[in-house]
């Protein structure tokens, strides 16, 4: 059991002012460790420590930042075996998920942004001619200019529970590379891996106050961190409801936000598409990490001529997906993060069935312990159903038929979300045409594969701003123009 989790404030490992709270393994319902319970005052101290460290850190060379990010990645890599066990226990992720997206993903992101620290920050601009009688009395002269990316300041990085270490690395990697200082606030359900990660970063030699951490099971410390006057930017991954509250708080002081929020992805299947590929792609994504993935295609929108066949294929794959102990290598679907989330997911399923949907596969799982839901496929859904409109964040797909392309696009665009959609078609031109008409920040055409260098973010209520690749470096910087006589 991990009993020594601490917050990090100003380069020191400190206890939470409110003591500790228990972390529960969602597969066994057993306590696996204790996490610090930080207070509002802890959060304010962490933000102040980050502000105090910003001046000197922002003046460090890109090469020094790169060295430290790589060193932190080296330490995490050396501890990977222990981290695999820890993160799997607190998240309930399968062996595949843990050994790809969880720990190695975090290490890869730190290394990516070690390289990112060395990317150019200047943008050359064409010279311009001053107008006669200009303000400097040099009418008709030439001015030269450039844009320069400067660090924003103190970044509060608040993350979700699904891929905790990876999410944190995707925020603090580019933020630190650009010369910002950070305060990390992980999700309350599974912060132990993040605590180990921040410990490794301080051990790597980041100066005191550059990387800070507060943890808590209640909203107290997170709310205090968002409102702290020393925070210049809030980067948040999580629900649209909480993201909206963060945006409201930050708007009062015009502070920067980067919000990666909810999704209700559409998997749009046209007649003539490779149905086997479409079914396998949809199934592999909506069942991955028990559907606790914001990019999951949780709405299956199928042209009517192939609707029944596509439903049959997807239901067969859902039934075949092994649900159980995430430590077993053949497990495809592990538990949801908590009993609360399991009950919420099953409530959506029950509500849809009560409203007329047909349960084609899935539903509750009979197990002695753990928070499990089987991959669930619902057909005969109406566009107005809550299960169709709201993010469920579990292994549930709702299916709707359409007759022509325009109707399919309307159905796909028919929610308040717009994070990640997928188009399956035999006509490449149609795929790109439809992608251009979808109100979605990301579109996969005949694939569910991701490219980490693309700009990632959402339209509508799925968020504000973009990260990913070099776009993340841009997100954690301000643009300054510098002008001089030419």
Image (tube, grey):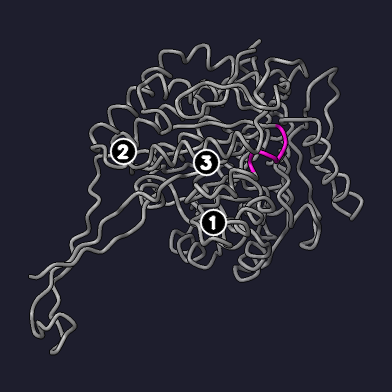
Q: Position of residue 232 (x, y in %)?
A: 47, 51
- What is the residue that sits farthest to the right in this orientation? 354
Q: Label 3 vs label 2: CA separation?
A: 20 Å
Could you tell me residue 367's position as x and y percent?
A: 84, 20
Residue designated by label 3? 157
Please state which of the two labelled residues, at mark 1 or mark 2, is closer to the viewer. Answer: 2
Screen quadrant of the N terminus: top right
Q: Which residues are magenta?
A: 217-222
Query: Is 220 within the magenta?
Result: yes
Q: Secondary structure at mark 3?
A: strand
Determine whether 145 is above or below 66 in the image: below
N-terminal label among 1 and 2: 2
Q: Residue at x 15, y 80 (%)?
A: 136
From mark 3 to mark 1, how far is it between C-alphas?
18 Å
Determine the residue positioned at 62% across, 30% down: 215
Question: Above or below — where is 413 with respect to 456?
Answer: below
Q: Nearer the viewer, residue 287 or 14?
A: 14
Question: Looking at the image, is mark 3 or mark 2 earlier in the sequence?
Answer: 2
Q: Earlier in the sequence, mark 3 or mark 1?
A: 3
Q: Position of residue 307 (x, y in %)?
A: 70, 54
| Residue 56: assigned label | 2
Is 189 situated left or right of 203 in this image?
A: right
Residue for badge 1: 458
Circle 2: element type: helix
Residue 393: percent from the left, percent from the top?
A: 70, 42
Q: Residue at x 78, y 52 (%)?
A: 387
Q: Is residue 390 left or right of residue 141?
A: right
Asked if the residue under mark 2 is in contact with the one under mark 1, i.e. CB atoms within 8 Å, the reply is no
């Amino acid at each position: 059991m991990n009993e020594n989790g601490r917050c990090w404030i100003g380069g020191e490992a400190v206890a939470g002012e409110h003591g500790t709270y228990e972390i529960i393994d969602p597969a066994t319902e057993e306590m696996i460790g204790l996490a610090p319970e930080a207070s509002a005052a802890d959060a304010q101290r962490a933000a102040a420590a980050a502000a105090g460290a910003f001046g000197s850190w922002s003046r460090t060379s890109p090469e020094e930042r790169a060295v430290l990010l790589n060193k932190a990645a080296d330490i995490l890599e050396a501890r990977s075996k222990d981290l695999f066990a820890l993160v799997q226990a607190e998240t309930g992720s399968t062996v595949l998920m843990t050994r790809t997206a969880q720990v190695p993903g975090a290490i890869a992101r730190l290394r990516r942004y070690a390289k990112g620290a060395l990317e150019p920050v200047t943008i050359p601009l064409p010279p311009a001619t001053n107008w006669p009688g200009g303000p400097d009395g040099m009418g008709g002269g030439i001015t030269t200019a450039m844009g320069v990316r400067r660090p924003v300041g103190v970044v509060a990085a608040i993350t979700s529970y699904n891929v905790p270490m990876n999410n944190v690395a995707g925020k603090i990697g580019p933020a630190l590379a650009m010369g910002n200082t950070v305060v990390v606030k992980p999700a309350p359900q599974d912060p132990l891996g993040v605590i180990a990660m921040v410990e490794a970063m301080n051990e790597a030699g980041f100066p005191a106050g550059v990387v800070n951490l507060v943890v808590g099971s209640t909203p107290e410390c997170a709310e205090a961190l968002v409102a702290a006057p020393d925070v210049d930017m809030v980067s948040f991954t999580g629900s649209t409801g909480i993201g909206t509250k963060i945006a409201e708080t930050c708007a009062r002081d015009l502070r920067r936000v980067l919000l990666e929020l909810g999704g209700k992805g559409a998997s749009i299947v046209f007649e003539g598409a490779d149905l086997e590929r479409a079914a396998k792609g949809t199934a592999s994504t909506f069942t991955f990490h028990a559907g606790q993935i914001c990019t999951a295609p949780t709405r299956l929108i199928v042209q009517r001529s192939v609707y029944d066949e596509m439903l049959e294929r997807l239901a067969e794959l859902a039934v075949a997906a092994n649900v159980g102990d995430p430590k077993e290598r053949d497990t495809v679907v592990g538990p949801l993060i908590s009993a609360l989330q399991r009950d919420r997911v099953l409530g959506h399923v029950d509500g849809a069935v009560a409203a007329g949907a047909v349960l084609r596969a899935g539903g509750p799982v009979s197990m002695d312990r753990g928070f499990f839901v089987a991959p669930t496929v619902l057909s005969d859904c109406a566009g107005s159903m809550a299960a169709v409109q709201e993010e469920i964040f579990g292994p549930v797909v709702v299916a709707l038929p359409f007759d022509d392309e325009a109707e399919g696009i309307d159905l796909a665009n028919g929610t308040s979300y717009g994070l990640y959609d997928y188009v399956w078609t035999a006509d490449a031109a149609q795929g790109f045409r439809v992608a251009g008409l979808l109100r979605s920040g990301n579109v996969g055409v005949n694939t569910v594969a991701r490219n980490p260098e693309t700009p990632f973010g959402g339209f509508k209520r799925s968020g504000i701003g973009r990260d990913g690749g070099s776009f993340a470096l841009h997100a954690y910087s301000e643009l300054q123009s510098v002008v001089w006589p030419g």
